[in-house]
Image: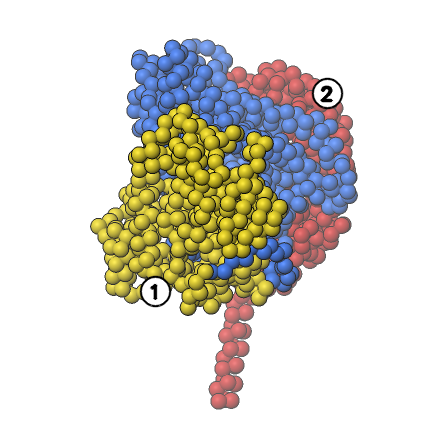
Chain colours: A red, B yellow, C blue
Amino acid sequence: MKRSLRLFSIWLFAVAFAVSSIGFATLASAGVSPQEKKLVRAAKKEGAVTLINPLFSDRTAKRMQRVFIKRYGLGNSFRLNNIRKGTGSTVATVRQEIKAGKFTIDVHLVSAPGFFHAAQKKKKAFAKLDSAHWKDNVELVEKAGQYHNYPYVVTPLAYTFQPVWNSSCPGMKNINVSSYADTVQPALTGKTISPDITKSFTYTNTVISLIENGVNMNAIWDKLKATKPIVEFRTEPKIQMVIACERPFDMHNLSGRVYQNVLKKPGLAKKLKIGYYKEGQVLLGNQAAAVKGGPHPNAGKLLVDFLLSKEGADVFVEGEAIYSFRKGYTAPAAARPYLLDLSKHKLLGLKDWVGAQKKFKKVRGEWIKRFK
Amino acid sequence: MKEEKNSDYLIIENLVKYFGDDRAVDGISFAISEGKFLTLLGPSGCGKTTTLMCIAGLHKPDSGEIRVGGKSFTSLNENIFLEPEKRDIGMVFQSYAIWPHMTVEKNISYPLEIRNFESSEIEDRVMEVARLVGLDDMVGKDATQLSGGQQQRAALARAIVCNPSLLLFDEPLSNLDLKLRERMRLELKRIQNEVGITSVYVTHDQAEALVMSDDIIVMSKGKIEQSGGPHSIYARPVNRYVSNFIGVANLLKGKISSVSKTGLSEINISQDGKNILMPCVLDDKKFREGDNAVLSIRPENVYALREKPEGTAIEGEVIQTVFLGNYIDCRVQWGKFEWKVQAHPRERLKKGDHVYIRLDSNHSMAVLP
Amino acid sequence: MKNTTTTIQPNIEPQSRWRGYITTENIVTSLTSLIIFVAIILPLFWLVVSSFEVLDDMGFDTEWGLGNYYEVFQGRVIRKAFFNTLMISTGTTVLATFLGVLLAWINARTNCPWRDKIEPFNLIPFFLSPFVGAIAWHNLAAPKVGFLNNIARAIFGIESHIMNVDNIFGVIWVTGIFFTPLVYLFVVGSLRRMDPSLEDSARTTGASLFRTTMSVTLPLVTPAILSGAIIVFVTSAGEFGVPFKLGAPYGWDTLTTQIYSKAVGDDANHYLGAAMSMTLAAITGVLIWIQRRIIAPREYTTVTGKGFRPNTIDLGRWKWVALGVNLFYIFVAVVLPLICLLIVSFHPVWEGRIIPADLTLWNYKKILFFWSPESIGIATRGIINSFILAFSGATIAMILSILISYMIHRTKGFGSTMLDFLCVIPIGFPGIVLAMGVLVTYIKTPIYATLGILLVGYITRFFPYGQRNISSIMLAISEELDQSSRMAGASWLTTLRRITIPLLKPGIFAGWILLFVIFLRELSISIILYSVGTETLSVGVLYLADFEGDPLTAALAIVQTIILLGCIVLFRKVAGKEALTA
C-alpha cells in the first residue's frame, strides 16, 4: 500500500514536471517575460478573463483570444470575454461595480483619463501591475502627452478623430479636408455631421486640446452652424450616413470605421476619404487597468500586459486600425493604409488630462449655445 | 319549545362580526336540533348571510363560538378557527356557483374527489344524488348548458353528495322566477327531509321561510328579533317588527290598560280622540299596566260585518275591495286607520259599504312596540 | 330551541388573533405581497433618494441637495428634452387616437369588406418593436436616401424630399402608428359591447348616420377613447427606441434619451438621471391616476356588458374607402417597414440605394450561424436569452399576477387596497427609469450581471399588464365559485388549482402571451441591465446599430420581427382567435 502510494507520487511528480517543462518550452519560445510567466499558471486556473472596452469587434476579440491563449499556453478552454459598449457605458458599468464592491469585469480599456485617475485616487480601484512591456510603451506615451498612472493605469493604444467623407456622393467630388477651415466651407452646407460633444468625453477632450493649442473653436463653431450640420456622437451610425450619402461628410470619425466597412465591401475604399487636421491631430490614449477585486485577477493583469506587447498590438492594430504606443512598432500591412504616419503630423495631447474634466462644463456650454 | 334528544346539534353563542365599525352580527346566540331545517329570515343587511358565512367559515367572526355536533368550529376564546374545508358542510350559494369549466357530473363529484373516494363509488353517489334532485339525465352535460333551475338542483346535489354534517343555503331561490321558486321550495324541503341533514337556510322571503322551516329566526340589524316555529312566529309575534315582517297585520298603537294572568288583558287604543279598550293576548310578555304596546292582528282574524256586533263597535266604510278568488282583500276606513280585512266572498262587500269591524280577541296580540 | 338576544361586547384577546392567521393562504399571500412590495418599492426608494444626491466632478462622491432638480428645470438641454417629450407624447396621442378610433369603428361597426380577415393585422404593430420600426422608417424616409424620397424624386423629378422622419415629426409618426393598436384595443371592445338600441333610438329621431356616429356612438365610447389615449401618452413619454433613433441624433432629445445618456453616457450621472426620472414619472403618474380614478370607473356605465351583436352600418360606396384606410394602415405600419428592412439587410454595406450586384445573405449568416468564425455572438446570444427571459418572465409574472389579483379581489382590508395601488406604480415608470432603480438595488446581490436581474426588471415593470388581464376576469367571476369549492372540502391551494386558475385560464393565457411578446422585444430595461453574455434581442439590434452598421442591424431586426410574428401566429393557432384580439 505504502509502496504503491510512493510510486504513484513519483509518477505524479514526473507528469507534473513534464507538463510544466512543456509549458515552459512554449512560453520560452514566444518570448514571454518572467513577469508574465508568474501570472500564467494562476491565469490558466482562473480559466477566463473579461475585458470591457468600446473598440474591439467580435472579429478582433476572437483573434485576440486565440493569440492570447497561444502566447501563454492557457489551453483551449480559456475564454476571453469581450464586452463592447459605448465609451460612457463602459465607464458607467465599471464605476457602478467599484462603488458596489461587486465585480464582473477584470480589465477596463477606454479613453477616460479623468475616470481612471479618480477611481484610483479615491477608491484604489486598480491592481498594481508589474509589466514587462510598459517600458517599451512609456516613452511614446509621454512624448504624445498622454495620461498614465503606472503601475496602476497604463496606456497601450490610441485613436484620433479624423475627417471622413464619401467622394462618390453628389457634390463631394472636389471636397478635400485638411484643416478645420476646410470643414466649414459653404460647399458642405447640409452635408456635415458634427460630433455631439455633450455626449462624449473624447470629442470634448479633442476640443479642449485644440483650444489649448490656440485653435479658436468658437469661431469655427459659428461658421459650422451656418452649414447646418446634424449632431450625432456614435461613430458607426455616422459612418453609415456617410456611406449612404445621407450626410456625406463627418468631421470626427475613426479611420478604423472606414477600414471595417471596406472589409465588408472592398469597393468602398475608393469612395471613402480620410483626411487630417493640420491644426493638429489630437491623440486619444486609451487607458487600461486591471480592476482590483475582479473575478480573474491574474488573467486580468496578464491581459493588460498582453495589450502592451507586440503580439497584442498586432491583433488590435490589424483588427481596428488604431495606434500602438510601442517603440519602433510597425503596423500590419492590412491596417497600414488607414493609419497616419504619426511622425509626419502635428500631434496634440492635453496638458492635464485629469484637470480637463473641470473644463467640460464651460466648453460644452459654449457648444450647447450654438447647437442645442 | 320541546326538548329533543339532540336539541343542541348546532350551537351559536354570542356571535359578533364587524365590517369596519359596523356590527353586522351583534352578539347573537341560538341552537338547532339535529335534522331540523332552520331559516334565518330578515331584510337585506340584517346580518343573516353574515351569520351563515361565519358558520361556513368563509367569514371569521370577531368573537363568539360555533359548535356542530359537539365539535367546535369556531371559538375565539380558545383560539379555534376551523378552515372552511375542514368543517364538512354542504352549501348552496345564491348564484349557485356551478363551475362553468366542468361538466355537471364533475361539479357534483368534486367533493367526493377531494375526499379521495373510489371512482366507482363516486359514480354511484353522483347518480344517486342526481336522481334525488332530478338531474339524472343531465349529468354528462356541460354546466353552462343548464337552466337556472337545473343549476340550482346541481348545486344542491353537490352540497349533499358527501353527506355533510350541515347544509347551508344562501338565498338559493332568489334568482328563480316565481313559479319555479314555489315549486323548488317544496322540492328542497322534500329532499332535505329525505337526506335528513340539519340545514340552515337564509332568505328574505317570509313565505319561503314559513313553507320550508322547522324553525325560523327573524333578524334585524344584526340581532335576533324572535325565534320559533313558523306557526308561533306567525301567530304569536313578539314585537311590531316581526308581526309586520311576517305576513300582513293590522297594527295599532296603544297602552296596556289591564293585565290578566289567565284570560284576556286589555289594551287602550286611542283613535281620533276616542279611547277604545280592546281585549288582547299578552302571552308571556312581561307587560305592566300603562306600558306602551302595539295591537297586532292578522287580516284573517278581522271580520267586517254589516250588522253591529255586541260589545265595542268599530264602525267604518269599505274603501277598496280586491277579489282574489278564495277571499276578498278588503280595506275599511276607520278614522285615519285603514283596516286590512280578509272577507269571505259570500259577504259580497262593495266599495262604500258601511261595516262594523269585529276582532277575534284570541288572535289579538299585544306586542312590543 | 334556545335563543338569547343578549348583546355582548366582543372580547378579543390579543393572542387569539394570531394563531388563526397561520394558514397556507395567509402565508402565500403575505409572501407575495412582500415580494411585490420589495420589488417595486426598493428601486423606487433608491430613485427618490438618489435624486437628492448631487455628484461631484470626479464622479465618485456625492452630497445632499436639490442641485439635480435645479439642473432639470434650469439646464437648457434637459428643459428642452422635457418639452420635446411633451410634444412627442401629445402628437403621438393625437395620431394614435385618431387612427385607433377610426380603425376600431370601421372594423367594429361598418360593413367594410373583409374586415374580419384584416382585423388581426391591424394589431400586429402592437407586437412588434417600435425601435425596429424607427430603423425601418429612417431608411424609408430619411431626406436624402430614404426609399420613399428616392422614389418621389425619380417620379416627380424634384430636387428635395417629400418626407423627413429624422425629426420630431418622424418620432411622432412612427410612435403613433405603432401605438395605434393600444387605442384600438380599448375602443373596439366598447364599440362591440354597445347596446345598438342607443344608436337606433338616435336614428329614429331623424339623425343621419354620420350625425348619430358623431353625437351618440363616439361620445358613448369616450371614456374608452380617453383611457386608450392616456395609455398612449404615458407609453410614448417612456418610449426610448424611437426618439433614440430618429430624434436625438437630429437635435430632438427627449427625457428618455437624456436619461439614457445620464445612465450610461460619458458623463454618467445616475443622480441627475434619477431626478429626471422623477420628473417623467410625475407626469405619467398624474395621468395614470386620472385614468384610473376618473375615466376608468365611467367606462361601462353606458356600455352594457350584454353580448349584443351590434348592427353594422352600411357605408355604401364609402366602404371601399374604409377598406383603403385599413390597408393603408397595415401597409405603412407593417408591410413597408418590413420590405425596407429586408432590402437593406441583403446588402453588405448600405449605400442608400439597391445595388443588385451586391445582394447577399452574408448578414444573416453572420448573425445566425453562430458556429461560423465570422459570427457575431451577441445576435445568437440575444435570441436565446430573449427566449429564456420571455418564457420564464411571462410565467413568473403570471403566477404573481394570479396571486395578486386574488389578494386584491378576494381578500379585503388595507392590504388589498395597498396592493392595487402598488400595481399601478410600475405602469407610471418608464422602463429605463425603473431599470436604473433595479440596477442599483440589486447590484450587490448575486443576480447582478446575470439574466436574473433582467428577469427582475422585466417582471417588476410589466407584471401589472398580466395582473390587469387576470383582474378583469376575476371581477367578472363570482367569489362564490371559489367559496363553494372550500365548502366542498377543498383547501385553499386545491381551490386555486382546480377552480380559480381553470376559470381564469383565458385571461392567464392571454396575459402570458402578451408578456411573452413584450419581453421578446423589450429594449429600455435591457439596455441598462445587460452584461456580458446576457444580451437580449433588442440589445443586439442596438449593439449592431452602434457598432456594425445598418445592414446587419436590419438583418437582426428582420429576425426579431419574424420571431415575433411567428409567436403571434403560433399562439393564435394554439389559443384560438380570441387570444390576440379584443
Residue A334 to residue A22: above or below: above
The residue under label 1 is which amino acid type? Asn
Chain letter, disc 2 residue: A
Identify the element where label 2 is drawn. Answer: helix
**How many numbered discs sit on the rendered protein?**
2
Q: Residues within 10 Å of mark 2 (few under 14, many from 20)?
A: few
Q: Quadrant of the C terminus of chain A?
A: top right
Q: Which chain carries label 1?
A: B
Helix, strand or loop for disc 1: loop
Q: Whole-percent x and y of residue C472?
A: 45, 40
Mark 1 vs mark 2: tell me if same chain: no
Q: Mark 2 points at which residue?
A: A219
Between residue A217 and residue C498, name the one nearer to us.
Answer: C498
Q: Which of B220 and B16 is in front in this view?
A: B220
Q: Are marks 1 and 2 in contact (CB under 8 Å)?
A: no
Mark 1 closeness class: few <14, some 14–19, many ≥20 residues within 10 Å: few
Q: For the residue marked with disc 2, what is the amino acid?
A: Ala
Q: In this view, does A103 lie to the left or right of B155?
A: right
Query: Disc 1 designates what residue?
Result: B116
Q: Where is residue B107 in the image (x, y as percent from the top left)?
A: 32, 53
Q: Is residue A2 visible?
A: yes
Which residue is at a point 60% across and 54% down the rendered structure image? C7
**Quadrant position of residue C320:** top left
In this orientation, which residue lies closer to the viewer: B108 or C556? B108
Q: Position of residue C328 (x, y in %)?
A: 38, 21
Instruction: Residue A302: give x, y in percent of width and height.
Output: 61, 57
Q: Residue A281 carries which label?
A: none
Q: Distance between the residues labelled 1 and 2?
A: 89 Å
Q: Is residue A47 visible?
A: no
Nearer-the-camera pick, B259 or A138: B259
